[in-house]
Image (cartoon, rainbow, N blue to C red):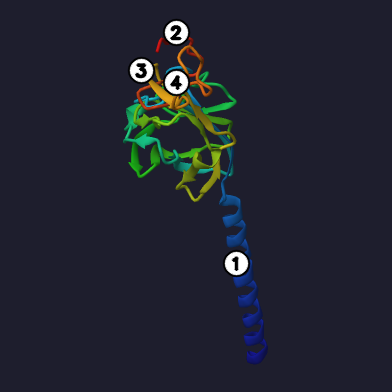
Amino acid sequence: MDAITSKKFGISTVATIAMITVALMFASWRAEAVVSAISFAPAVGGTDDVAGAAAADYNITFTAANATATGIDVTFPAGFTIAAPGAAGITSTGCTTPATSEVCIGGGVGNTAITGATIVGQVISIAFGGATDLSAGTVTFTITTGVTNPTTAGAKAAAGFTVATTGGGAEGAVAAGAGVTIINAAANKLAVTGEPTASTVAGVAFATQPIVTVQDTYGNTVTGDTSLVTL
């Protein structure tokens, strides 16, 4: 009897351990957040997407599944200068609050409150007041302080813009679905970007004409400028 009881106990113990292991694996799988449909968009065209613009406002949206988190990490690519925005620098400006299809982050009734926003390198870490379910709709917020645009105009690849959920046992990150295009700043100077032929006969046009480009203070070409230039 003792031998049989021992054997039964051994099988039962193994089965129990196996069940616990499967349960833990299932719980871990359920906890993995899936973040998608990320969008970083300058809030006001011609102002917040300008080269070198300080305190540029960015509307950020994304969707999340299985994401009960205590915060999010927002990453801007190299070239953007990031400073700590603090809690006041994260608002719900971009929300139609409170909409059932949105999870609005920032001040306002029914919104997800935040306790701070700090930086490490290119990452802005936004902390919530507690565990928050981000799966209820499109997560929407605006960064109004702390981001300075690159001084080089042009398209910035999507791969550098990411969002990750943090804490709450659910973490995940994915690259943004579209990049950001930085436009030139205001016209500031002229630059000879194409040299003419070294010499020519008086009264005869240079075989290779000079090219004069209107540039902003950072050396970006000012597109669409129709200023008359006299040499």
Q: Which mark is residue 228?
A: 2
Mark 1–mark 3 Cα distance, whole angstroms, equals 66 Å
Residue position marked by numbered label 3 in the rendering: 188
* Mark pair 3, 2: CA separation: 14 Å
- Above or below: residue 134 compared with residue 204: below
Element on which disc 3 rests: loop
Residue at the extreme front: 201
The amino acid on which the numbered mark 1 sits, given as a three-letter code, is Thr
Q: Residues within 10 Å of mark 4 (few under 14, many from 20)?
A: some
User: Which numbered circle lies on residue 21?
Assistant: 1
Nearer to us of marks 4 and 1 is: 4
Q: Amino acid at mark 2?
A: Leu
Is residue 106 shown left or right of residue 2? left
Instruction: Give the image location of residue 141, x and y in percent.
Output: 47, 28
The numbered mark, 1 or 3, whose residue comes first in the sequence reads 1
Whether residue 6 sits left or right of residue 164 in the image: it is right
Three-letter code for the amino acid on which mark 4 is drawn: Thr
CA gap, disc 1 and disc 2: 76 Å
Q: Which residue is mark 4?
A: 213
> In whole angstroms, how far apart are the C-alphas of marks 3 and 4?
11 Å
142 w.r.t. 24: above or below = above
Which of pointers 3 and 4 indicates the residue nearer the eye? 4
Q: Nearer the viewer, mark 1 or mark 3?
A: 3
Q: Position of residue 229 (x, y in %)?
A: 42, 11
